[in-house]
Amino acid sequence: MEMLSAYEVARLQNATKKTQPISQTSKSKKLKLKKKQQNGVSKAKNKSPKENKGFVIVNTKISPQQNAKNKSDNHGQLQNNSSETNKKVPFQQQNGAREQSKCSNAITKKTVKNTKNLTIQPKKVVKKKKNTKKQEVNNKNLTELPAEHGSESMSIESDEEYFEDHVNPIEASEEAFNWLVYPIKPDTFMKDIWEQKPLHVRRNKPKYFSPMMSTPLLDQLLRDNYIMYSKNLDITSYSDGIRETHNPPGRALPSVVWDYYLNGCSVRMLNPQTFIPIVHKINSALQEYFGCFVGANSYLTPPNSQGFAPHYDDIEAFILQIEGKKRWRLYKSRNKKELHPRYSSPNFSQEELGEPIFDDVIHAGDLLYLPRGTIHQGDTFGSDEHSLHITLSVYQNNSWADFLEKLLPNALKNAIENEPKFRQGLPLHYLKHVGEVYKNKKNDNMLKEFVDKTKSLVQTVFDKYLNVHEAADQMAKNHIHDFLPPMLDESEAICTVQEGGEKMIENGEVVNRVEIEPDNMVRLIRHHCARLVHEEGVHKLYYSSENSKEYHEYDIQFVEVDEEFVPAIKKLITVYPQFIKVDHLPIKDIVKKVQLVRDLWEKNIVITEVPLPALMD
């Protein structure tokens, strides 16, 4: 990693004004760990940028005037008003025990449960809309919902209705990333930092990341949820050069976990977004920004300890320091093979590392970004403070290598199917001219002809059969399976099948019956949540809106799309994030237009611009 000059550091400042899996041990007995300095390393002191080679440090101590101008406090505000869902009824679906369903057919409806939402600086404009009789009935039903279901976003005054516009999902995703790397401008980050060099942002704002998690919240999660060792939580230690996992079987109960902690063990929570809505909210927004899965782990380290051995990861890592402080040492990749690695490394010994390019303490509110392949280790030795941080991970299996692995085999397969010359037999006796024994042989005409023929066939593959669109669809299909489900704001949720539509009240009565109408305005719920793919002779719409928050808990989900509906699906995708009137979809039959949108709405793939009005009895 290259060293930044003082000029470059100043320019950046002016411009802005997953963790490696480890094998588990069968040991369940808690170990009394020595609370001592690891390998004789003393407590780190804050170092100047000159001592941290190849590293960008941004100190964000800003004057009150600059702070007001940049509205930095707004970047850190996270409000409690979004929704999450629990699926209750699986729909007819291809994969596993589920049966396939076509968008041209009606799809079984589901009951969905909602909780509070969390938003990142929603930008909403209040639109005044004329009221109708149907809307009055629907508003009556809406106002009967409990407050936590977002009824405050609807205000009914005599004959007028006010409805808050949806947050633009693209703008919201950009705002989430802006909040993450602030005060670095996103464009500057992607141009000068991303995949190139580590970054440390000193914010001098200890509460910047505090809404995401806390140690009392972790204790409460252990009490309120059935959190399992190994699946949801790891107990780890690194002492005398030995990295160990101490997970007993069964549920992680707080008293036992904190006993391990008092004995010097670190506590890693896997995928905290499963239990913490705000982490799910942020990761969901960042998925729209990056176009791939955004995961998270949290790490709680007691004072005077280290939980993990030095290693590098196969993800771009954003370390968000929430509580306390932690010393981090970073090291250059040892060779080109370790640059942008596709797989995480084994544990390294201290002797394998060399001198660190960065050795500093990260405080609460700070951000530390590590490109994949950055060898790192963190500890709290010499400190009487604990450390709590969350690592957001992104861009796993999202490299050119992954893309080419999709592209080239398919291109060769298509060439073999369509070109007889690929299926011709190899030359007689070619094995007497090609191979290790013959590779340095000169003036061998058969060897030359063999090499030329091979190059000609490969060139045919490149010239005629490379299909980047097919390869991109296969990449997107993998992402669809990986994604967290979208987390919606209240103003959005009421316009989806999550909170809109039929509702059962007392005495078994169902109210708020709704239907899609030709004049309804709709769009995709999120761009990254749906992908139209042509494979095996049919069109399939893959979607992630019904994924679990638990990684790959369900099979990948899709519906087959009849040919007459394909132009309408493409239209919905290409006009995003704009809404389009159902009647304007490129399908001739108005009944089929409504039918398609109804099926997509019931699968939580599309959202309406305003809540669907209840039908009159």
Image (cartoon, rainbow, N blue to C red):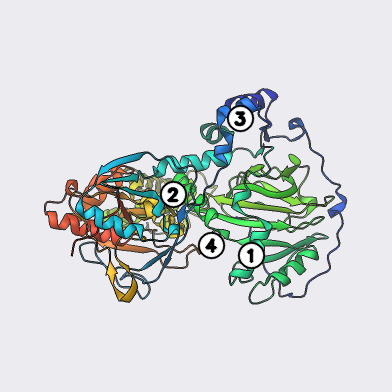
Q: Residue at x 82, y 55 (%)?
A: 304
Q: CA distance from mark 3 to mark 4?
A: 34 Å
Q: Is residue 594 left or right of residue 417?
A: left
Q: Nearer the viewer, residue 22 or 320?
A: 320
Which residue type carries mark 3? Asn
User: On the picture, is 357 further left or further right than 430?
Assistant: right
Q: Amino acid at mark 1?
A: Gln
**What amino acid is found at the position of numbered circle 2 in the picture?**
Leu
**Distance between mark 2 and mark 4 Cα atoms:** 32 Å
| Residue occupied by mark 1 | 220
Q: CA distance from mark 1 to mark 3?
A: 35 Å
Residue 101: quadrant of the picture: bottom left
The CA distance from mark 3 to mark 2 is 46 Å
Q: Nearer the viewer, residue 456 or 25?
A: 25
Residues at discs 1 and 4 in contact (Cβ within 8 Å): no
Q: Secondary structure at mark 2?
A: helix
- In this rendering, the label closer to the viewer, 2 or 4: 4
The Cα–Cα distance between marks 2 and 1, rounded to whole angstroms, is 45 Å
Mark 3 neighbour class, 10 Å CA radius: few under 14, some 14 to 19, many 20 or more: some
Q: Which residue is mark 4?
A: 274
